[in-house]
Amino acid sequence: MSPVAVIAKIGTSSLTDGEGHVRREVVQKLCDEVAEVRARGRQVVVVTSGAIGAGLPALGFTDRPRDPRTLQAASAVGQSRLMAVYEQALAVHGLVAGQILLAPFDFFHRSQYLHARGTLERLLELGVVPIVNENDAVADDAIRFGDNDRIAALLAHLVGAERLVLLTDIPGLFTSDPRLDPDAEFIAEVHSITDEIPAIIGGAGTIKGSGGMVSKVAAARMAAYSGVTTVIAAADRPDVLRDALDEAAGVGTIVRPQARPLPARKLWIAFAVEPAGRIIVDAGARGALERDGRSLLAVGVRDAIGTFGRGDSVEVADQEGHAFARGLAAVSSEELASIVGVRSSDHPEGTPDEVIHRDELVLLS
């Protein structure tokens, strides 16, 4: 099997028009470029949004509804319509599309992870272009990703891709929203995604989609921690996939990978789940976590913010408010409140010794 060069993700705002209909010319352009990369002996996996947007007009909706069940129904109707457009666009080049619908479970349980990877590898061996989407029609709203940017980042890790290309409706990251600020400056390259960047680039994107630049930054950060370079670029740029592979000048914002990649489960802990709360620790506890690789103990905890249960994702911050880690809580916020600052030997019976076990903790410093 040829190496996977690109995970190419395209969003709803780029794929659909103002009424939600799939823009066939956009899909054709993307598929033309996929074929070009394939002709160079490289593999491409496409991650596509647009199923809900494609399904709403077929069901008679002119505005996007808010209730999850209707959105899931629209996804079920729209997915086949979306895939038909991809099949026709790839057939022009003699290529076959293969649909894969994924959920978080497929990445974070080892048997499913290996099965998903095996399926993708076999499709690529057979010359198929995998077209991936989140399984919105049956996804549990409590555990679904909610956008395909993070799925694309996890796929990049899953198949060891060279590039994650996130295609959107603006040319990349700017110091502020270029649609609102004429003085916004383009950011050509990012070597370390800090907590400040999401604040610079703002919130969700268009009403048609579920992501926006914040989700793209989150995906780029995930990819960086898995050793993959990300390019955030405009979907309508000519030859964008080729230029992203070649890192052509001005192709988009290039986000460089970190030196020490994380395994898939720790990627999930760090980035795929929104924290349910925050745990404030003292300097001694931070040093034990960062320097010595210890578990977080209650004796080093100074406060807990939010309501969370055992197994929920939580953020870990120092007393100055700087978040430096994420992990899965071994105790609930209610349990933690009774043992803040207490040594493990003095915990009530049945309370875990660790607040967060080191195997469930990811340092983000």
Image (spheres, grey):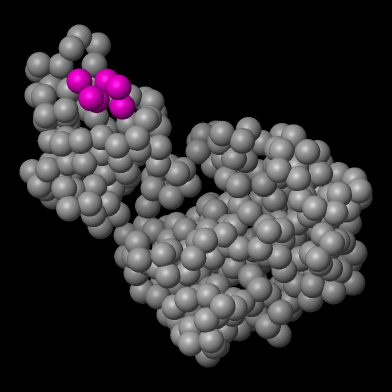
Residue 167 visible in image: yes
Q: Position of residue 7 (x, y in %)?
A: 61, 64
Where is 259 relative to 278, above or below? Answer: below
Where is 87 relative to 255, above or below? Answer: above
Tally of numbered discs: 0
Q: Nearer the viewer, residue 138 or 13?
A: 13
Q: Nearer the viewer, residue 98 or 218?
A: 218
The reply, left or right, for residue 361 in relation to residue 127 is left
Residue 245 visible in image: no
Q: Main secondary structure of the magenta part?
A: helix
Q: Nearer the viewer, residue 315 or 92?
A: 315
Which residue is depicted at the point 89% across and 56% down?
84
Where is 173 relative to 183, above or below? Answer: above
Where is 114 relative to 82, above or below? Answer: above
The reply, left or right, for residue 23 in relation to residue 72 is right
Q: Position of residue 179 (x, y in %)?
A: 59, 78
The reply, left or right, for residue 62 in relation to residue 298 is right
What range is drawn magenta here?
333-338
Question: Where does the N terminus fall, quadrant-wise?
Answer: bottom right
Question: Where does the C terminus fall, quadrant-wise?
Answer: bottom left
Q: Position of residue 116 (x, y in %)?
A: 62, 43
Q: Is residue 12 magenta?
A: no
Which residue is depicted at the point 30% across and 22% down?
334
Which quadrant would residue 245 be assigned to in this image? bottom right
- Residue farthest toward the bottom in the current orientation of the protein: 249
Which residue is depicted at the point 25% across and 35% down?
304
Which residue is depicted at the point 16% across and 48% down?
319
Q: Position of residue 271 (x, y in %)?
A: 43, 50
The reply, left or right, for residue 230 in relation to residue 258 is right
